[in-house]
Image (cartoon, rainbow, N blue to C red):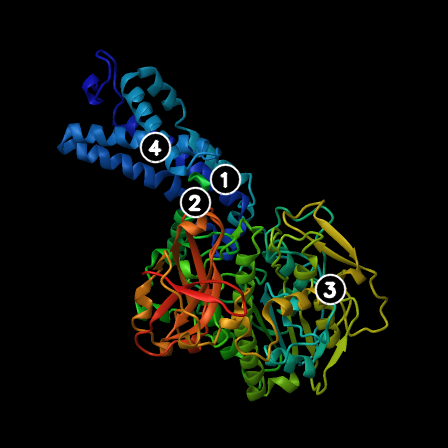
Amino acid sequence: MSDARDLPGSKAGKTAPGPLIRVLHIVALWSFAVAQPLLDLLGRHAQFFVAQDSRPADIVTLLTVLCVLIPAGMALGSLAVGLVWPAAGRAIHLILIALLSATICLQLLRRLDAVPGVVWIAVALALGAAAATAYARFTNLRTYLSLLTPAPLVFAAIFLFFTSVKKLVWPEPVATTATAEIDSDTPVVMVVFDELSLPSLLDGDRRIDAVRYPNFAVLSDRAHWFRDATSTAAGTIAAMPAILTGRYLGPEGDRDRLATAASYPDNLFTLLGDSYQLSVFETMTNLCPHELCPPTEFDVGSGARLRHLLLDSGIVYPHTVLPADLAARLPAITDQWGNFASVARKRRKRAGWREMGRKPEIFAAFLGSLRAGENRTLYFLHSGLPHTPYRFLPSGRSYGAAGSKAIETDGLENGLWEGDGWPVKQGYQRYLLQLGYVDRLLGELIATLEESGLWDRALVVVASDHGVSFLPGQQRRKINRHNFPEVMPVPLFVKLPAQREGTISDRNVELVDVLPTILDALDSPEPWSMDGVSVLDTQAPERATKRMYRAPYGPDSRLELDASALDAKYAVAKRMWRIFGPSDDPAALYRLGPFADLVGRRLVDLRIMPAAKAEVRLAEPDLYEEVDPASGFVPARVRGELRSERLREKPLHLAVAVGGTVHAVTRTLKTGVASAPFSAMVPESAFSPGRNEVEVFVVSGPAKRPRLEPTRR
């Protein structure tokens, strides 16, 4: 039996815990400090596992590692040290008790936002130290902790049996309820973009802007363009099933329904799977059963999948325990379902920027799958573009690797734009630049279809799952009666086999109409009851309303509007043009704010004043020392921090010059203190190979005759 000396500070005559009990104590505390908050979050967002294509064994292994192996390994490590150096082993054990107790306390303290996070961390550490001292001194406390040792099993059971994860660990068989004979030999090519709002593509005449988006304009001239098409859900996990099943969300709501083939067994893939070859590239969903869609080059083995799960979980967990001001410094976990841990890879060297991320790679692989001579084949791609994060320029070059600070969006927190309009405009600017890249990819798709001979023979469908909004003080995507003109309208193009001329239709079309349209074009009957109707059926009665569902999806998530309300999308397009100017100006997207006319002017021609009492610290200044556009990366987003007493009164306008010419104007964010961050998008043409001189000026005075004050570096 161990004596009282086993734990420093324990009262004489009291029995200290033995080795097994020590291990169980660490495992129990770990389960409250780490396992339970993380499992609770992942259990409520089981789509995390769907997006990562996790298999049942992956989830169970993650659970075992999280609940047992990591804490037991920590405890056994302290015991191993104790075999060599008993005092050190006991000290390590108490340190673990203190840290885990502090973490539990921090989860409670973080709810109080009035105090800076570092203060709460200090308080939590003090409470943790007190808890460890009490643990060492009082037997009763250790006894109570022993009673909590079943906690890991309880938390694991709740996770496995009482959350949506249950559907993934014990998946139901994919059993379609209806079949149809597809006799057509027509190949089907379907591309669904993500978060592409139709008003962003429009010009002043309610047509596609042929200057900014020439390939979308070409598609509108050669296909049926349904200009009043709208999405049926404001999130991918509900929008994609609606597109691929032809059905709205059920009346009972889809709050816990995952975007998997087991949840939606009647869909485009299962319908065509018996008659067609399938070349399917899904992102975020698993609606095509594995037996119909074999692994692609992007599917990884079990070891890699588990590694990604552990790494991403390690990024998600701090968001559950750290105070809000400290969590804001972590990699963002909103608007995507994985790859959070990529920020841990310090991609600061030029060679590192060659990694362009999975989105363009998947698009390239999809283009490579388009084969000449293939008839009965469905080619399907759900692209992750132009969805956040924004990091691509129209040329396809990147200004930030996945997970880097350069691609984070200012003014956006938990899907809500802040009231300051400036960072919202900058987010809109970066979205439109990335949309230019999407147009480039669309051009590659059309060219590939023509070269392969598929263009004339194929049914081609191009759409987006939902849109996105850029309104200060409003939700970026969660639909309401303010942002619906941006979130609901989406592009929808249908090019029939042998079609030569395009048409524009203003019929009330929704994305639940896509699957009935495909079946109509293939001359196949509908095998199950659908809410949608074929857009090719001009005799079908037209809807009088527009329907959309907002997350969280449930019985009260439905928003229904009069169809005429969607004409507001044209006002959105006009607002975009007021912000960014005409598209025939190549630099229009870089001309923002009251000093927009400075863009393109040389410093020698401007009124340069004495240096301002301001200091600038550029983020990653080494990126400008050796620019190599051929690498696929240009540091086009200039970021930094400005320090000036004038910032206490109001934000300051700035001009960013590269090589002696002003290429961007920007403004600091509102902080009310003597320092503030800023960022500015600079055209990639501003950079030349090699070293580039970047200068930042404070701008003031009248817009017609501005004053530029150099800043100190």
State the CA–CA distance, disc 1 to disc 2.
Answer: 18 Å
State the CA–CA distance, disc 4 to disc 1.
Answer: 26 Å
Residue at (56% x, 45% y) in the render? 164
Mark 2 or 3: in front is 2
Query: The disc labelled 2 sits on which kind of residue?
Result: Ala
Residue 688 occupies quadrant: bottom left
Which residue lies under the disc numbered 4?
A: 122
Are circles 2 and 3 on residues that touch, CB within 8 Å? no
Q: Is residue 190 visible?
A: yes
Few, some or many C-alpha atoms within 10 Å of disc 4 (few <14, some 14-19, many ≥20)?
Answer: few
x, y (%) of residue 126? Answer: 33, 27
Given residues 327 and 592, the one toward you in this image is: 592
Which residue lies under the disc numbered 1?
A: 40
Which residue lies under the disc numbered 3?
A: 510
Given residues 269 and 672, the one toward you in this image is: 672
State the CA–CA distance, disc 3 to disc 1.
Answer: 35 Å
Mark 4 or 1: in front is 4
